[in-house]
Amino acid sequence: MSRYIDANLIRGEAVVYQARPHWILFLSWRSLLTLGLLPLVEYVTSEFAVTNKRVIMKIGWISRQVLELNLHKIESVNVDQSLLGRLLGYGTITVIGTGGTRETFDRIAHPLAFRKAFQEQESEFEDALDRQRASSSTAKATP
């Protein structure tokens, strides 16, 4: 598991799915010009996870871009894939929060699996809320 994610899990939180950047990072002009050093740093320092309570995404080491959103504060997780992305298994993930937050993360390996993990956790979270509401309304109804 990743260091940032491990260090920032809250009580009762568990990682359900974790993703990494795709190796396609290393096939670029930036990689060629820096002898692969910049893509390697990006690959090693990027962490993406779906937990049972939130979505955590971090890119960078010295300068960081971090997104941590509770599941109930996320409207959607969108996936964009080019033809090459579909063939090689990478894409762009865009997380849209309820307050209009829109964060995009490029060249993520297996983006559809990431979105599916989010959707499953969101569904479980909503089911748990429904059960809690039903039990509290039943408790109020009985004298």
Image (tube, rainbow, N blue to C red):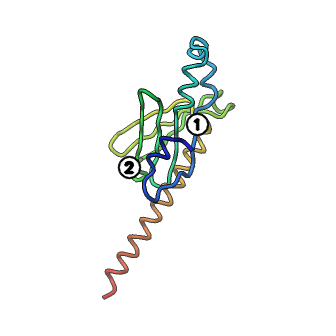
Say how many tags the image has.
2
Residue 126 position, x and y percent, is 45, 61
At a point 41% along the width and 70% down the height, the residue shown is: 132
Q: Which residue is mark 2?
A: 73
Q: Which quarter shows the C terminus?
A: bottom left
> Position of 88 compared to 93: left or right?
right
Residue furthest toward the top? 33
- Quarter of the figure that contains the N terminus: top right
Tell me how far mark 2 sits from mark 1, CA to CA.
23 Å
Up-down: is 121 above or below 138? above
Residue 28's x, y, as percent?
60, 17
> Where is residue 96 drawn, in percent x and y?
42, 41
Q: Nearer the viewer, residue 69 or 131?
A: 69
In the image shown, does 85 or 30 lie closer to the viewer?
30
Mark 1, residue position: 20
Residue occupying image coordinates x 36% and y 46%: 98
Relative vertical location of residue 89 with respect to residue 37 in this rendering, above or below: below
Dot 1 amino acid type: Arg
User: How would you rate the neighbour count of disc 1 (Cα within 10 Å): few for under 14, some for 14-19, many for 20 or more?
Assistant: some
Mark sitting earlier along the chain (2/1): 1
Q: Position of residue 114 (x, y in %)?
A: 56, 44
The foreground one among 132 and 76 is 132
Query: What residue is at 41 percent from the left and 43 percent from the top?
Result: 68
Disc 2 is placed on an element classified as: helix
